[in-house]
Amino acid sequence: MASKQPSIRNSASQPISVGLIAAVTERIGPRSQDRCSINGIMHDAIAKRRLSGKPQETARNNIFPGCKHADRCARMTDTAHAFDSALLQLLSERGHLHQITDAGALDALAQKQVVTGYVGFDPTAPSLHIGNLASIMLLRRLQQAGHRPIVIMGGGTAKVGDPSGKDETRQMLTEERLARNVASIKGSFEKILRFDDSESGALLIDNDDWLSKLGYIEMLRTVGPHFTLNRMLTFDSVKLRLDREQPLSFLEFNYMIMQAYDFLVLAREYDCRLQLGGSDQWGNIVNGIELNRRIDGREVYGFTAPLITRADGAKMGKSVDGAVWLNEGSLPGYDFWQYWRNTDDRDVGRFLRLFTDIPLDEIARLEKLEGAEINDAKVVLANAVTELVRGADAASTAEATARDTFAGGGAGEDLPTLGVGADGMRVGAVLTDLGFTASNGEAKRKLAEGAVKLNGKTISDPGFVIEAAKGASLKLSLGKKRHAIITR
């Protein structure tokens, strides 16, 4: 007797045959993505799982729970498709495309009208970092293609905290702290996006404007019926935390509902038809799409970009010394520039496409450079990103500092500076105060390794006191890439 095919149940408790999914996938081909012709939701990764031989039971996270039409999910969208709209062409050719819902419909919409799209940013720190820059670039591309970007400051959602990609509960921030963070972050968007009254002029909106006014009972009655615990427990932001037996508060559990409600409000008030974000936001974005469809019958769309890692596997946005912040007050301009200048050879072309507006044919030329010449491409990358985020003056000053420091053996004016006073300061304390080392213990290890130099001379004694004459300056170096000016 033939074995019975396993089935997956959606939120309506209707069985979806895994065998049927596999049959559809077989018909599609390995590079395609399966999209429900009714809900317009892509179930990507099914083909990938089939090809890799992984168990099909994991497919439940890729079948939209509201989809009752597994037998009609044969209409495909290939990510290699040559799009007709300037918007999707631009996003695709610059390397931003990872997943998209109903690409054909969004492509057609972007050709006939201005599309309003948004990305949300929770103000959990006084500055965004370069991991956030990838999402800001999505809004920049949207505006470059003639559409309207909305920046959502998550003053409301940040009070709850997004559990996506987190192993533990986020620190609770006071309303005063959140307000200060919002004010501090705004300047980053004003440098990268155009805010004006034109049809494609960017908007900056705080979701606390509506979330803080929403009554609990009202929220439960409006949104609650459209979410099931069965489905919510399958999302990675929840499932991974529970699988690791790490606590997930009821507060965090509500985050996905609040983000979905954001999309509903924006669609109603601003005719916002598109939410963009990193691939870790896919589940939250799909929630908002489904909430719009179920409550208002409105078709809206989602687009995610790949989470960016460096060629060495490290997460984008981090350096050996911590986060690479966008704000000048959180990270000196020279250090920001130097991060990009130190890009791995293998990442140069990809980062030029993602984080700059340099024409693609010029990028193709730059990424083909080899040997010492690839360093010229890295300088182009560092200048372009620093100019975009910090301004032209910051880029030129940082480049001049690097040239003086490395080529001329001098000390550029943009290096971090520390005064040691008339009595001087122990070298370990200087390294730690500059942020070059995390502790005096680490400073001692660096000294023992011979990695510390003062005006080109190696210092190994942890008891050495750095003294500077009045009006004089010294150059302190840790390794080949960290330098500072020491004054009295």
Image (cartoon, helix red, strand yellow):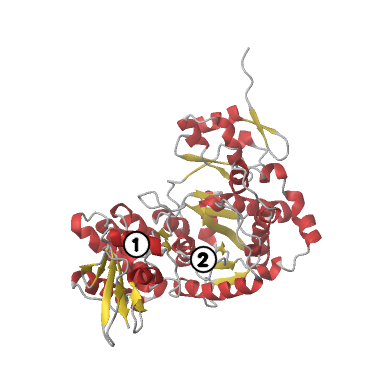
Residue 56 appears anywhere in the view: yes
Q: Which residue is the site of mark 1?
A: 444
Q: Amino acid at mark 2?
A: His
Q: Quarter of the image for the C terminus: give it.
A: bottom left
Front residue of this view, candidates 164 and 383: 164
Say whether residue 324 is left or right of residue 211.
left
Q: Which residue is the site of mark 2?
A: 147
Asked if residue 38 is positioned above or below residue 178 in the image, the reply reads above
Q: Quarter of the image for the N terminus: give it.
A: top right
Between disc 2 and disc 1, the foreground one is: 1
Say whether residue 212 is left or right of residue 76.
right
Say whether residue 298 is left or right of residue 185.
right
Query: What residue lies at 24% left-to-right and 72% top-to-bottom?
Result: 405
Dot 1 falls on a residue whose secondary structure is helix
Neighbour class for label 1 at 10 Å: few (<14), some, many (≥20)? many
Query: What residue lies at 69% left-to-right and 56% top-to-bottom?
Result: 251
